[in-house]
Image: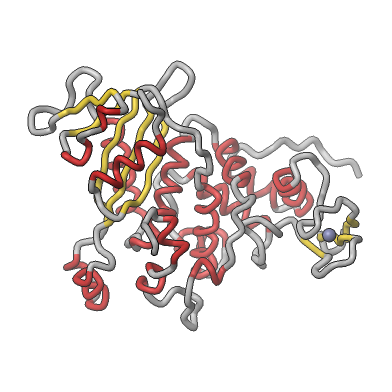
């Protein structure tokens, strides 16, 4: 029987129907995984492989361990037993949910356990991480904010950490490159240990081309930027904007971010905040694209970011969920990711 002409989905409803077909899901993943169309063994790189159509996996013909591999190997989906159609629906939902989506919503929407949904969310956020090292230029706003719960709303064991200074409010630094004729505005956001001059300046120098125009408020940590940038300061004690001197672009992003956290999540643990920032920055930066375009970009982000379950959750409790924030915060890889210095 001849297959009817099928077009690539444009809505969630179409995506669910489209990817329910195993061949559609596999073909799509193949085109993301091996864009040149040549399936290669992730172990040895050989293209001399055979496809086992009944199990939808390949077998490398070179002699080595683990000759068999699936389309998931070497991506953030590696080792996951969840079927591709559920994964792809999850990608679609998260790429296009304006305020994000909680693990409870994902669990109910696609029919996996909440634990599995939690893990899927983290992997998808990893795929949303902006890997580009391209610097901002032109007119760039810089600002910082604090995100995190108040101690009085926390459990006693969490309060203890706050007092010990382990968790609590988290400092977040943002940069926003304003609209130019070539492109709409974009953000880069990052968790910092504190908002002292050293960290803020380092972040700006790393991500903004020298000589660009920088807009900040009168916060003292920003002083000194005029040595390498055209530094425009708006003193919020006086007013919020003088002509184009303002940080309103970032203020808008902060309120979007905080609304998302408040509306969607019971709480975002400080040690997971950076992934949520990745997610919101992604949606902001890709806001002009359509749903299918954002979906393809997120799925395209699965490469080279393989993350094992154990690595993600650190030490596990019996239910597979992380036991304590403290064990996470002591992980060197996490500290590095958050921009903390490690000895
Ligand atoms: Zn091989």
Q: Quadrant of the C terminus?
A: bottom left
| Quarter holding ligand 1 | bottom right
Q: How many marks?
A: 0
Nearer to us in this view, 7 or 205? 205
Nearer to us in this view, 133 or 56? 133
Nearer to us in this view, 290 or 327? 327
- In this picture, residue 237 sits left or right of residue 104: left
Question: At 19% across and 33% down in the image, what residue appears?
Answer: 217
In the image, residue 234 sits, relative to residue 24, either above or below, namely: above
- In this picture, residue 161 sits left or right of residue 264: left
Residue 265: image x %, image y %? 36, 58
Residue 129: image x %, image y %? 50, 47
- In this picture, residue 294 sits left or right of residue 335: right
What's the image's color scheme? Answer: secondary structure
Instruction: Give the image quarter of residue 324.
Output: bottom left
Question: At 49% across and 64% down in the image, what residue appears?
Answer: 118
- In this picture, residue 231 sits left or right of residue 135: left
In the image, residue 283 sits, relative to residue 154, either above or below, namely: above
Is residue 24 something that shows in the picture?
A: no
Question: At 53% across and 49% down in the image, what residue appears?
Answer: 93
Residue 214: image x %, image y %? 29, 28
Residue 309: image x %, image y %? 56, 68
Q: Quadrant of the N terminus?
A: top right
In the image, residue 290 sits, relative to residue 94, either above or below, namely: above
Query: Residue placed farthest to the bottom in the image?
Result: 318
Is residue 161 something that shows in the picture?
A: yes
């Amino acid at each position: 029987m001849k297959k009817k002409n099928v077009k690539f989905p444009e809505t969630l409803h179409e995506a669910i129907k489209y990817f329910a077909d195993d061949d559609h899901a596999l073909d799509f993943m193949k085109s993301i995984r091996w864009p040149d169309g040549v399936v290669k063994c992730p172990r040895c790189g050989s293209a001399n492989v055979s496809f086992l159509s009944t199990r939808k996996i390949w077998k490398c013909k070179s002699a080595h361990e683990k000759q068999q591999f699936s389309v998931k190997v070497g991506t953030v989906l590696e080792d996951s037993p969840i079927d591709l159609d559920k994964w792809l629906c999850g990608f679609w939902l998260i790429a296009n949910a304006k305020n994000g989506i909680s693990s409870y919503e994902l669990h109910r929407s696609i029919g996996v356990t909440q634990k599995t949904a939690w893990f899927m969310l983290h992997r998808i956020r990893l795929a949303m991480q902006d890997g580009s090292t391209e610097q901002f230029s032109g007119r760039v706003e810089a600002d910082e904010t604090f995100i995190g719960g108040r101690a009085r709303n926390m459990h006693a064991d969490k309060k203890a950490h706050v007092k010990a200074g382990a968790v609590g409010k988290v400092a977040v630094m943002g940069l926003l490159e304003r609209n130019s004729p070539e492109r709409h505005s974009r953000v880069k956001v990052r968790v910092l240990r504190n908002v002292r001059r050293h960290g803020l300046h380092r972040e700006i120098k790393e991500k903004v081309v020298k000589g660009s125009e920088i807009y900040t408020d009168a916060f003292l940590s920003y002083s000194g930027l005029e040595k390498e940038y055209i530094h425009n300061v708006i003193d919020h004690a006086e007013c919020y904007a003088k002509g184009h001197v303002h940080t309103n672009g970032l203020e808008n992003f902060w309120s979007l971010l905080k609304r998302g956290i408040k509306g969607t999540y019971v709480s975002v643990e400080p040690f997971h905040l950076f992934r949520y920032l990745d997610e919101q920055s992604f949606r902001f930066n890709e806001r002009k694209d359509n749903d299918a375009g954002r979906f393809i970009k997120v799925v395209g982000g699965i490469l080279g970011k393989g993350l094992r379950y154990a690595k993600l959750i650190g030490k596990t409790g019996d239910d597979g969920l992380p036991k304590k924030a403290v064990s996470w915060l002591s992980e060197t890889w996490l500290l590095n990711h958050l921009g903390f210095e490690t000895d």
